[in-house]
Image (cartoon, rainbow, N blue to C red):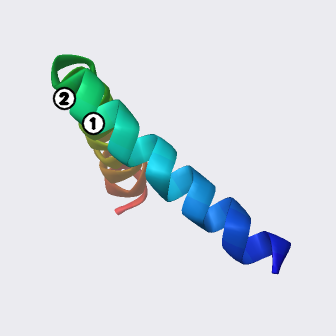
Amino acid sequence: MSKVLFQWGIGLFVLFFLVTSPASAADLVRSIVAFLGGVGAGLSDFVGNFA
């Protein structure tokens, strides 16, 4: 029961964050995507060095 409440709480907080400050939410998404792109490029270089 508490797990369900926690998930709903997180979902509502994310929704509140998106509605109240969409510019900050967009910056956060851009940062996450850039980070994941960097990780992907690093892994690609790492695997490419073994080939």
Residue 11 against residue 1 in the figure, above or below: above
- Residue 15 appears in the figure: yes
Residue at left offset 57%, top offset 64%: 8
Question: In the image, residue 26 lies at what x, y percent?
Answer: 18, 29
Side of 35 where 19 appears, left or right: left
On screen, residue 16 versus residue 33, left or right, reads right
Occupied quadrant, residue 30 = top left
* Amino acid at the residue labelled 1: Leu
Residue displayed at 69% across by 76% down: 4
Could you tell me residue 20's position as x and y percent? Answer: 27, 25
* Distance of label 2 from label 1 (alpha carbons): 8 Å
In this figure, which residue is indicated by the disc labeled 1? 18
For the N terminus, which image quadrant? bottom right
Q: Against 28, is 47 above or below?
A: below
Q: Considering depth in this image, is 19 or 42 the residue closer to the camera?
A: 19
Residue 26 bears which disc, if any?
2
Labels 2 and 1: the sequence-earlier one: 1
Q: Residue at x 62, y 65 (%)?
A: 7
Residue 50 image position (x, y, % from top left) = 43, 57
Q: Is residue 31 above or below residue 12?
A: above
Q: Residues within 10 Å of mark 2 (few under 14, many from 20)?
A: few
- Say few, some or many: other residues with alpha carbon within 10 Å of mark 1 (under 14 / 14 to 19 / 20 or more): some
The residue tagged with tag 2: helix, strand or loop?
A: helix
Labelled disc at residue 43: none
